[in-house]
Image (cartoon, helix red, strand yellow):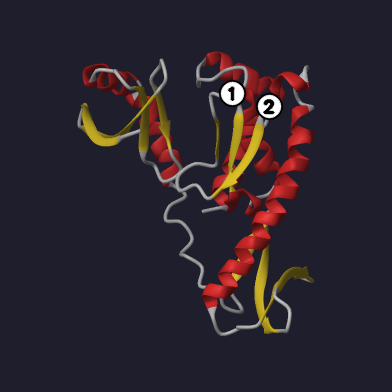
Amino acid sequence: MSAVRHSVQYGEHTIEFVIVRRDRKTLEIAVEPDATVVVAAPLDAPLAAIEDKVRKRAAWVMRQQRYFIQYLPRTPERQYVSGETHLYLGRQYRLKVVPHIQATVKLVRGFIVVQTHHPAKPDITRELVERWYRERAQIKFAERLEVNLLRFPDPDDFRPKGLIIRHLQQRWGSMSPAGRLLLNRRLIEAPTDSIDYVMTHELCHMSEPHHGPAFFELLDRVLPDWPKRKERLERSMS
């Protein structure tokens, strides 16, 4: 898989985008939360065809970019020291790092309490907090998957072949052609209704792989308030 930067002119505007070539049959354009544009293209797709596709979707691309830009810049990188705030399921918690013979993380009355052998070492605190987030994500995402499958008339038809949790730089989730649901670990910081939006959006791809009219008809049917959930996601996680 290769990634190449390119651009096209649309009136007075220049649209920059990244071409990612994959073993697939169709072109697809995505605008990521940081407002970058990614075109997933077949391995043999001519550059002219890719440029033409971007120009045809230019108005939509620019609308999506304006939507995401309103939430930038994002929160600065965490330092993992006592007193700073961290999110869990949409709520803010204060980080409290304390010396202890055990290395654990737990929620205690508005605090994420990190017990550690090395309270003065933020890198170790980061590792402990990240491990805790991943453990919570494994549990919570599995729970929400069962809830969100019930939105569909035949839940088993939309059940993914697997659930994968990773740190993703630009997107909240994706559904692979093989039917594996990939979710951004950071989603465990978001409100539950926003997690449900991302998950339901990706489950719709089990039936409709592309963001065409049929996809949005299905999403509107199973989750009518998805635009509000999407907006809350971007606002809470900005």
Tell me the CA gap for discs 2 and 1: 16 Å
- Left or right: residue 224 versus residue 125 is right
Which is more foreground, mark 2 or mark 1? 1
Question: Disc 1 on helix, strand or loop?
Answer: loop
Residue behind mark 2: 224
Q: Position of residue 11 (x, y in %)?
A: 21, 26
Q: How many marks?
A: 2
Which amino acid is tagged 1? His
Classify 10 Å Cα crowding around label 2: few (below 14), some (14-19), many (20 and above): few
Classify 10 Å Cα crowding around label 1: few (below 14), some (14-19), many (20 and above): many
- Between 232 and 192, the residue placed more toward the observer is 192
Q: Position of residue 192 (x, y in %)?
A: 71, 46
Vertical relation: 85 (above or below) 8: below
- Between 37 and 173, the residue placed more toward the observer is 173
The N terminus lies in quadrant: top left
Residue behind mark 1: 205
- Left or right: residue 120 versus residue 196 is left
- The quadrant holding residue 163 is top right
Q: Residue at image x 79%, y 71%?
A: 109
Q: Identify the mark nearer the N-term, 2 or 1.
A: 1
Q: Position of residue 3 (x, y in %)?
A: 31, 36
- The quadrant holding residue 223 is top right
In this rendering, does residue 212 appear at all?
A: yes
Which amino acid is tagged 2? Pro
